[in-house]
Amino acid sequence: MPTVLRYLLKPKFLHMTLLGFVAGVPLYLIFSSLSLWLDQVGIAKSEITYFSWAALGYSFKFLWSPLVDRLPMPVLSRLLGQRRGWLLAVQLLIMTAIVWMAMTDPSAGDGALIRMAMATVLLGFSSATQDILIDAWRIEASTEKDIAMLSSVYIVGYRLGMITSGAGALFIAGYLGTAVGDYQYQAWQISYLVMACTMLVGIVTTLMIQEPPTKQDLLYNTRDYLGVLLVFVVAVLAFVFIYISSADLMLWFSMQLSHVISNQILIDTLTVAIKLIMSLLGAVLVATGVSYSRLINQTMLVSVYVQPVADLFKRHRNHLILLVGIIALYRVSDIVMGVSANLFYQHMGFSLDEIAAIVKTFGLVMTLTGGLLGGVLVVKYGILRIMLLGAILSALTNLLFMVMAGMGKSLWFLGVMISADNLSAGLAMAAFVGFLSLLVNRRFTAVQYAMFSSVMTLFPKILGGYSGGMVEALGFGSFFMLTALLGVPVILMLLYALKVKAFDFGENDKSPQ
């Protein structure tokens, strides 16, 4: 314990906590708080959960992470450094997106819901970019001795940010008088404007922290950087074009599947997955063709996009499939459940004040406990063991939601449920973030961590977009049972990884005492 306290007294741990806080704030403004806002307007649950797809930027951030890693931000990179310059610019963009959401009343008609969707997508894109930079700073500022505790305080800050934009936003909106059956736009507007102001914490922290010592190569000229940016822009345009133009084809494909599969949710999931894969492959092919243009510096393009990927395959080739499986499925149970959790609370008859109060009290204590406990346990027992414990607890806590669905409204049980959920999530994520951080080669920090975290969220968030439809089809009780079962495959993978000693994190030296 004295060792832990010695770590926590260092300034960079406070800075990491604050950066974790602003990384966590945008998430619930896209998911749960926005879900309750739209629910009060009267939007269908199946449509509300589609808004969670705005957070798919988190899952595709690996595509632009090389640009954030290498491309200088005009003026700011020179004044503040590569990481801090980008971070400041992106935090200002996050504030802009939240203010845009606050100034949009989704009940107003005349395309208001579309404008809300655009603002939400901007928030998802900018906050995902902020994650790239914060993850890079955390890894580059850490040592092998303090990476576990640095990851732990990051999760503490992250969960505090989620509570602020979840419980805090709900408390403000509820206090100002909005409720189911008595929708008050001004209450939500003020709530989101206050959330925009919380990003000032990140801006001040960015100005306070030191630029980490990196080996980043910024010796290419402006023309070379613009060439790489051109490849990225063309790839994005190709992705959007293919995604939109394939709508009729995918509709036909969906109709054909309906003759074979009776489950519409499964059909929609498969259709969207195929559509995304087609668009992504098309974008890669178009970008590859453009990359051979004379405008593009081939050497720079290889160093920015190819080398980080090649390094990953080389270092993890023996257990690559297992690694991808663990990363892709570790959070699926939590994310799919979380998209509809607040809709469940409101469905059970809890007011916004009650939801906020329980999350604010019990959730806050358990968030702090879970994050710090995860860091301490990782130091003592090793990352994979604590990841396994976190995966088991995350699946089991989803069963508590199923129990409440069958028992009716209960404030004391909501407190137990929120406490268990936050404790398990904090512990699991502290271990998982440490796991991903140790997998990264520091030569390619931003790119490789972005790839890992993209894989981590892609499948869960696609599936989470259909959670509202699942609830309508299955009911809340069966839905929560399903989300618990989704956690079983990753538990089996972690057991296998421990058995075959798949990853060299010194697990053999961390045996329980």
Image (cartoon, rainbow, N blue to C red):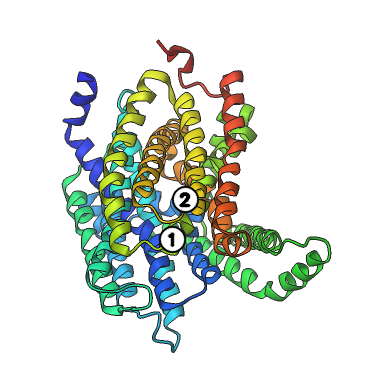
Separation of marks 2 and 1 at Cα, in angstroms: 9 Å
Mark 2 surroundings: few (<14), some (14-19) or many (≥20) residues within 10 A = some
Please tell me which residue lies in front, 368 or 295. 368
The residue shown at (47%, 50%) is: 404
Instruction: Please state the total of marks drawn on the protein image.
Output: 2
The residue shown at (31%, 59%) is: 90
Task: Assign the C terminus to one quadrant of the image.
Answer: top left
The answer to whether marks 2 and 1 mark residues whose Cβ atoms lie closer than 8 Å is yes
Residue 88 lies, in percent from the top left, at: 25, 57
**Which residue is denoted by mark 2 in the rendering?**
404
The residue shown at (61%, 19%) is: 500
Please tell me which residue lies in front, 80 or 183. 183
Question: Can see residue 73?
Answer: no
Residue 369 lies, in percent from the top left, at: 29, 35
**Which residue is denoted by mark 1 in the rendering?**
348
Question: Can see residue 272?
Answer: yes
Task: Assign the N terminus to one quadrant of the image.
Answer: top left
Q: Residue extending furthest front?
A: 407
Question: What number is the disc on residue 502?
Answer: none
